Image (tube, helix red, strand yellow):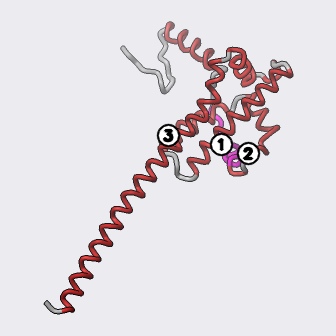
Amino acid sequence: MSWEAINATAQLISSFAVVASLWYLAIQVHRSTRIAKLAAQDAAASALRDVTKQFSENAELGRIWRVGLEDIDALSPDDRARFYHVTFQFLKAMETIHFHFIYGLMDEQIWRGWWNLYRHYLASPGLEHYWTLRHDLFSERFQRFVNQMTKPGEPMTVANLLGTEVKSQATQRSGAPDKRPHAANTE
């Protein structure tokens, strides 16, 4: 075998090695990206869970949240201050989730669920009031997102969901069909 043949064989082998290395690297980057997306989605959910968990663990704070969402003026000055504090935390968690989506760290389907939650809560009178007062505490991108969001026809939050459930049960007892999209017909 001549030196030229040995050199050509060596170059062919090294070319295969480079292609194999790049292929392996691409797989690792893809896996790493998937793991980063999952971690970001989990962190976002945890952030909002941490904020809302206190409403179920502390009945008084839960009451303040529910009342404040629908009628901020019904709260005492101390309760209003607590409402503003948890509203800031809630909106910052929402801003983080939005940030994750914008930078491609959140799956589109998961984002749709968060987006629907945003629409309902941001349309509540209490959050609208807070947003008017304190929108400047949030990034310009998040401010644009909130200001361009379309409000749902009938916002549903934890503050008014019970009333909706009571109406739904009365409708079901009367025999009229329940037209809510998430209602299941089990008959």
At numbered mark 2, what does the secondary structure look like: helix, strand or loop? loop
Q: Is residue 137 left or right of residue 178?
A: right
The rendered magenta stretch, by its main secondary structure, is classed as: helix
Are discs 2 and 3 less than 8 Å apart at CB? Answer: no
Q: Is residue 7 left or right of residue 143?
A: left
Magenta residues, as a range?
142-152
Q: Residue at x 61, y 19 (%)?
A: 161
Q: Residue at x 31, y 70 (%)?
A: 19
The residue wearing badge 1 is: 95
- The tag earlier along the polypeptide, 1 or 2, is 1
Point out the image quarter for the N terminus. Answer: bottom left
- The tag earlier along the polypeptide, 1 or 3, is 1
At numbered mark 1, what does the secondary structure look like: helix, strand or loop? helix
The residue wearing badge 3 is: 110
Q: Residue at x 71, y 19 (%)?
A: 61
| Cα distance between the residues tagged 1 and 3 | 15 Å
Mark seen at residue 138: 2
Kind of residue at badge 2: Phe
Q: Horizontal and vertical percent for residue 72?
A: 79, 24
Local crowd size for mark 1, using a 10 Å CA cut-off: few (<14), some (14–19), many (≥20): many
